[in-house]
Amino acid sequence: MGRILSIDYGVRRTGLAVTDPLQIIANGLTTVNTPQLLAFLQDYLSRESVERFVVGLPKQTNGRDSDNLPRVKAFVKKLGQAFPTVPIDMWDERYTSVMAHQVMLDSGIGKKARQNKALVDEISACIILQGWMESRQRSPFSL
């Protein structure tokens, strides 16, 4: 069984999270400068088995497409070309940044660390992945 890798795609930085090999727990992986993202993924997938990508679907709070959606769609196209055997799912990422900040507050992380946007992106990717995993547990048609 391969890992599932979650991507919180951003213009400057991209947060990544990944499951354990048994696909039970979502863990933050890292934050990568977006221009180096595909190279990072090539290297990571050369070392680890990844069964599926889950990419955050950027929506506004009212459900409309966000300004970042065209960039995410272009990235997903490149991702599919780079890794044609790895399926890609999109998952609603609304409120993940707010939830990431709350997780940081609840965990007692200091104010300076909470201002680390790279950490917020990584936690957001973890929240995206956790939400996707939980939806599969509820579905009688789980993958």
Image (cartoon, helix red, strand yellow):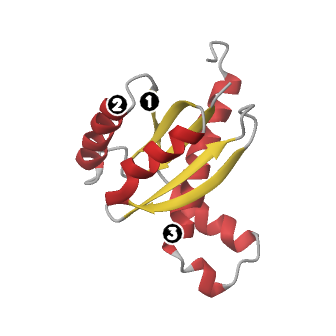
At horizontal 68% and vertical 24% (from top left) the residue drawn is 1
At horizontal 28% and vertical 46% (from top left) the residue drawn is 69
Q: Nearer the viewer, residue 130 or 41?
A: 41
User: Does residue 14 appear to the left or right of 103 in the view shown?
Assistant: left
> Which residue type does callout 3 highlight?
Ala
Looking at the picture, how far across and down is residue 126, in whole percent? 61, 51
What residue sits right under mark 3 in the picture? Answer: 118
Marks 1/3: CA distance?
A: 23 Å
Mark 1 touching mark 2, by CB under 8 A?
Answer: yes
Looking at the picture, how far across and down is residue 5, in whole percent? 55, 40
**Mark 3 residue crowding within 10 angstroms, few (<14) / some (14–19) / many (20+):** some
What residue sits right under mark 1 in the picture? Answer: 88
Residue 61 visible somewhere in the drawing: no
> Which residue type does callout 1 highlight?
Ile
> Which residue type does callout 2 highlight?
Gly
SS class of the residue under badge 1?
strand
| In this view, 57 is above or below 29 | above
Q: Nearer the viewer, residue 64 or 48?
A: 48
> For residue 130, what is the image quadrant?
top right
Label annotation for residue 80: 2
